[in-house]
Amino acid sequence: MSKGIGIVGTGSFLPEKILSNFDLEKIVDTSDEWITTRTGIKERRILEKDKASSDMAVEASKKALEQSNLTPLDIDLIIVATMTPDMTTPSTACIVQEKLGCRNAAAFDLSAACSGFIYGLSVAYSFVKSGVYKRILLIGTESMSRILDWEDRSTCILFGDGAGAVVIGEVPEGKGILQTELGSDGSGAEHLLVPAGGSKCPITKEVLDERLQYLKMEGSEVFKFAVRKIEEVSKSVLEKSELRSEDINYLIPHQANTRIIDSAIKKLKISSEKVYVNLSRYGNMSAASIPVALDEAVREGKINDGDNILLVGFGGGLTWGASTLKWHGK
């Protein structure tokens, strides 16, 4: 009997420190009303100065392993989706492998910005489907506060830190990941980027003076792109899955802006009651946003065995992706 391939455990971790909109009023020229009205964000989490993306990844992974009834030695591969790695090399995945004690696992990072988790889900599915690996730990972890310009009110208000993890493995036939669709458009790369720190623009005193080591974003362009692509990729992956919008029990979108989410669900004709949104508490956590939201929805009992789930993300690159799953609950 053929097996399905799906998520067998979830976990998440959020730093303790909370940075509210009222706190931001003391840092930049903004207001709680302005931020809330335009983004839906009320607060976000900020990682401790002596911690890094790998530390959050490890904590989220421990919870995912516990829920999966697995040990670190059961994991064959670790994939870390992040745009805020601990360092250029070694990969954050290798650092996580050592900290967790996953001695039997290969490890690598994946870079697709806020779409990273969906990209990673597709890669993990393919590895298990082909028989190369049996159990994969997929993590989205981001220390976005480390790449923000805290003098730029257009970006520093949007992002937060956190990590989410899932274990991918075999599930009963008919359950698990149904379809995934990915896309990219490099012509829009300049709309969301960190200009310096790579081979094109190494860090120099001049670069630091110009603050090019921080995230830059053209908000209006990203907004228009996101609204369009969420609808397009969601409809496409639903069609491939032979599902309709009304068949979806729960939608978990990338948490970037409530106006983007509201516009998308209106066009997809999905009730807001079927959409999980935690943006007001955490802000945009890039590759961590979907797995954190998924873990919370699972642990809150909102997602149950046999439910049809739609995950959709978009981000820098420009990149986008969506996945449908028939949930395997224990």
Image (cartoon, grey):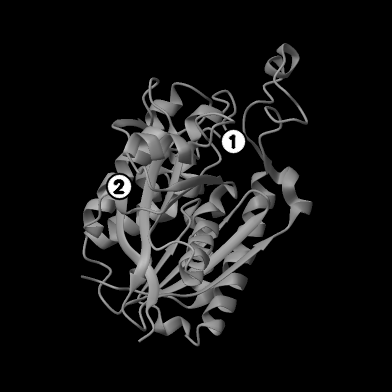
Residue 330 position by quadrant: bottom left
- Horizontal side of 4 relative to 227 (left or right) equals left
- Answer with left or right where residue 190 lies relative to residue 247: right
Q: Return the residue at label 2.
A: 72
Task: Provide the secondary structure element on which disc 2 rests.
Answer: helix
Marks 1 and 2 close (CB-CB < 8 Å): no
Q: Can residue 16 be seen in this snapshot?
A: yes
| Label 2 packing within 10 angstroms: few (<14), some (14-19), many (20+) | some
Image quadrant for the N terminus?
bottom left
Q: Position of residue 175 (x, y in %)?
A: 35, 78
Q: Quadrant of residue 24?
A: top left
Q: Is residue 39 above or below residue 14?
A: below
Give the x, y percent position of residue 31.
Answer: 46, 33
Q: How many marks?
A: 2
Residue 90, image x, y percentages: 54, 32
| Tag 1 residue | 154
Give how far across and how far down residue 103 sits, in percent: 36, 42
